Amino acid sequence: MSTTTGTTKKALITGIAYLDTREIEKNIADVANEAGFDDFAQIIEGYRPTDQPSYHHFVNEDLFQVLTFDASGVTGSGTATLTVTITSTGFARTNLKLKFANGKMGYISSAITTASGKDSFTIKSVDGTNLTAVAGDTVAPFGITTGEGSDEVTALSYGLTKYYNFVEHMKDKTEISDIQEMATVEAGTGYEAFRQAIDQAQSFKSQISATLIGGVKSVNEFGTASPTVTDINGNSMQFTNGLASESGAYGVSADVASAGTYALTDVDALCDALTAVKAPSNYMQLCPDGAKRKASTMWKNMGSSGVTSSRLNWNGKEMDFNVDQVTHGKYTLEYGKLDNLDHPQLFKNTAISKTIYGFPKDKVKVQVGPGGQGGQLNRIGVRYMANKYASQNQGTAYVREWYTGANNDRPTSGKEVKTIHVSTTQGFEGIGFRHAFHQKVLS
């Protein structure tokens, strides 16, 4: 009997009449081997409740901006005074010190004028030596220096960026007829209903994991007045952004230079890209097996690679999850295999099965929290709307399970079937994901 839609009935249960008794193993072998991201999220204690179907967080922006000289020209190059236009506006201020790539230091000695979104000003050398610059050169801001009895400086406003995601409401069910529920079978518990319930639970877990990894955020949400994404009854739907989409939208892209080859130069390029976004140094990577084998082969072929295998240590706790750990420069990279990324029916023909997804192991610092206090937040996890019926023996805090039909302790209809329903409302969460990365390894 293969997986199909509809109610499990006697006609679907294969039976062969024998005069002799049959030797049948009573235990049912599980070859589906479903394990996924939801398991990992629970291992790292990454499940957090939410009271609303959308959840938001704010991130402070970079406190400094590199200033780039515009193509409209730099005048005075080779002298102690430059007149320049830069490609941006809003950060340059009078008396701001500017460090040149060749080590020279200048300061903005004039008022700032702005036209077409570009600032113009004069730069003087602080030591009287000549300054050289051309269009496209950059200078780094070192802060404002003033003279004795100075006036006020121009104020700078610091911005915030808001990120948000949705929970997704997922459902499924399986159904078994009255005759088949009463009839005994020769494997498992002796009753087909139990086996169906177990398979449904495993399947639903994998559906959740696939969504948390590969989900794509919808253009509307439950409260959209005129939704364009609806179910068959016209109800507004919302979909969560999964790990792959969040990393793709906000994280560092670090694909290997030659697909199918994992080289030390690829690791160097990744580390440089992480350093460019001021990333922390300790990283967890979730890998499909093929990509992890490429990385393992490269590291272990190096004479003093220092690859160590251990259990994952997360927030000071040792977890039941094996990783290979390598230190390269200031970075510690841990490679862990996530079986769900190799799922042959869900991800085989997608980039997800060829890509390593990395994120910092530390918690992200909270600049200002409730009551003006700081703190820390998990960088990765799952937000869920709690199952309010869990206390009534209807599933767990994350997944609701309930029964309908006539064949129950409390019949809900006259139809003699047992229908098992499952539902959940949850979504992926990544905080400070500019420090996450995705690295496509396989072709």
Image (cartoon, rainbow, N blue to C red):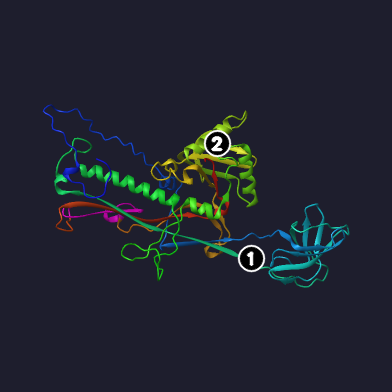
Q: Nearer the viewer, residue 24 or 313?
A: 24
Q: Position of residue 113 (x, y in %)?
A: 75, 72
Give the position of the N terminus as an image quadrant. top left
Please say whether residue 220 is one of the residues in the magenta stretch. Answer: no
Label 2 vs label 1: CA separation? 41 Å
- Report crowding for label 1: few under 14, some 14 to 19, many 20 or more residues within 10 A (C-alpha): few
Q: Which label sits on residue 158?
A: 1
Q: Is residue 99 left or right of residue 38?
A: right
Q: Position of residue 432 (x, y in %)?
A: 55, 55
- Report crowding for label 2: few under 14, some 14 to 19, many 20 or more residues within 10 A (C-alpha): some
Residue at numbered disc 2:
295
- The picture quadrant where one finds residue 52 is bottom left
Which region shows up in magenta?
Answer: 390-409
Secondary structure beneath dot 1 equals loop
Q: Which label sits on residue 368?
A: none
Instruction: Give the mark nearer the N terminus: 2 vs 1.
Output: 1
Secondary structure beneath dot 2 equals helix
Q: Nearer the viewer, residue 16 or 340?
A: 16
